Amino acid sequence: MRFKAYQALAGLAFAGLVATAPAHAVGFTIDYPGDNGASTDNTGSSATALFDFTAFNATSVTLTITLTNTTPAAIGSDLIALLFDLPAGPPPVTYVAGSFTNDNTNPLVWNYLPGESLNPFGSFSSCASVDTADCLNAGGGGDQGLSSGQSDKFSLRITGLGSDASAYSTAFFNLFAMYSADTGNTQATCVRFQRVGPDNQNSDKVCGSTEDTPDDVPEPGTLGLLGLGLIGLGFARRRRA
């Protein structure tokens, strides 16, 4: 009887694993190094942005971005904006209006601003900014933004490629990979810094790209089901022996 129970446990676990398999995140990390030609002021300010894509419904996915200010503490800076393009397709990827949300674990509030410019790097289709109306200046120079070593997270929904998170991840990755972080003025993603340096008097704009490959990252629930299935199979095999 116990053996049959273990078999049932294993079967249920793997059935759940199969049922939840599509609910996984895929993504990649963008590096914004402060020591290359894609920095306007070469202050040493730097950042990373993790782009994670997860299916939301039949027509859209959720893009979650984890933004980190990696500027050395000895330099110091406030990261106030992330600008990035959406893949133009065909078919084009578009933002689902009103879907931008904050992580709520950080008192910093980010805002979604479409169609922003960042000279000399051109215009970008999307911007996440701590200012409600401007990607270049945070509150007119007020004391806000991600300080050196801090991270924050926000999400938005995008549509155009159905519900396949991998398709969106690949489209974004290919767009960003087209641009080298140290050549040219046309870029696909950049970050904006203010209050740079010991006297807080400098600013910088740094653009980035990626040489990584998109990663397939199982969700915690999927990992838990996998572990449960393996435990069930282990008990079943031991009982059978």
Image (tube, grey):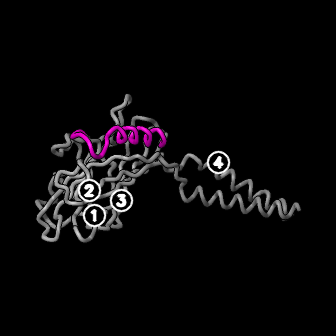
Q: Residue furthest right?
A: 241
Label 1: state its secondary structure. loop
Label 4: state its secondary structure. helix
Label 4 amino acid? Val
For residue 102, above or below residue 58: below
Q: Residue furthest top?
A: 90
Residue identified by numbered label 3: 153
Of circles 4 and 2, which is in front? 2
Residue 112 seen from this side: no
Q: Which residues are magenta?
A: 165-186
The reply to whether discs 2 and 1 touch (Cβ–Cβ < 8 Å) is yes
Residue identified by numbered label 4: 18
Quadrant of image for the N terminus: bottom right
Q: How many numbered markers are drawn?
A: 4
Residue identified by numbered label 1: 71
The reply to whether discs 4 and 3 touch (Cβ–Cβ < 8 Å) is no
Dot placed on the residue nearer the N-terminal end, 4 or 3: 4
Quadrant of image for the C terminus: bottom right
Q: Sort mark 2 into few (<14), some (14-19) or many (20+) by Cα contacts within 10 Å.
A: many
| CA distance for labels 4 and 3 | 29 Å
Q: Please give the name of the residue rendered at 17% of the width and 51% of the height, measured from the top-left corner.
A: 40
Dot placed on the residue nearer the N-terminal end, 4 or 2: 4
| CA distance for labels 4 and 1 | 42 Å
Label 3: state its secondary structure. strand
> Looking at the rendering, which quadrant does residue 76 occupy?
bottom left
Residue identified by numbered label 2: 34
